Image: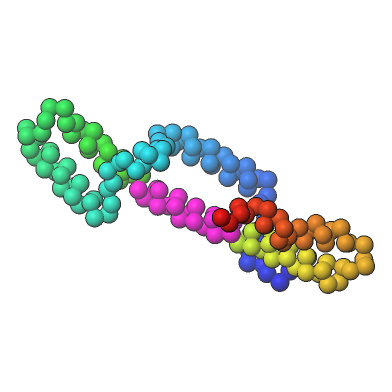
Amino acid sequence: MTQNRIAMAFGPDRLERIDGSLTALEADLDLLIALTTDERQDLVKMGNKSRAFCASAFDIAQQHAGLMPRDFDIEAFRQDHLALDALRPRAARMAHLMQRMADTELALGSDIMAAALEVYAVLKVAGKDKGVDEARRELASRFSRRRAADETPPKV
């Protein structure tokens, strides 16, 4: 093979540990929620610039609790702050891990695709009259223009 960006193999013991760790994470993170696209769009967002504003608002709400409406739950506000502070560094670690997984998946897929293209190129050149015509046609179907044209809607 001309391209080999990454070489790796997962043994059964390692896969079992990974799956066990993921199961444990899913169990420990059972408090996480899933929002719909509409719910995400409708929420007020707190960006990085808003963190200081929110921290100040919390301090002010505590200092002037008597001004706050009766139904304003300062304790829930505090708990949300604590939970976000606990979640953020772990989310950053998981995001970094997910990016590495995505990069590794991309590299493995690229290695596989490059090898497959190399196989196809060999069959096209050296495979003539070697009894691999059917295999070459099967691989060639990936590049069939007629098939791509069938999938493309007609221009109006």
In the image, residue 99 lies in the stretch drawn in magenta:
yes
Q: Give the camera-side residue of 43 and 155.
A: 155
Tell me where residue 147 appears, x and y as whole percent: 71, 55
Residue furthest to the front: 156
Tell me where residue 17 appears, x and y as whole percent: 59, 43
Tell me where residue 29 appears, x and y as whole percent: 43, 37
Magenta-colored span: 88-106
Quadrant location of the N terminus in the rendered image = bottom right
Q: Dominant secondary structure of the magenta stretch?
A: helix
For residue 43, side relative to residue 145 (left or right)? left
Residue at (83% x, 62% y) in the render: 136
On screen, 11 above or below 75?
below
For residue 87, side relative to residue 102 (left or right)? left
Quadrant location of the C terminus in the rendered image = bottom right
Is there any visible trace of residue 84 in the rendered image? yes
On screen, 78 above or below 104?
above
Q: Give the camera-side residue of 75 and 118.
A: 118
For residue 99, side relative to residue 16 (left or right)? left
On screen, 86 above or below 139?
above
For residue 22, side relative to residue 117 (left or right)? left
Q: How many marks?
A: 0
In the image, residue 153 lies in the stretch drawn in magenta:
no
Q: Give the camera-side residue of 30 and 155.
A: 155
Residue at (20% x, 46% y) in the render: 54
Residue at (9% x, 40% y) in the render: 63
Is there any visible trace of residue 82 in the rendered image? no
Residue furthest to the top: 70
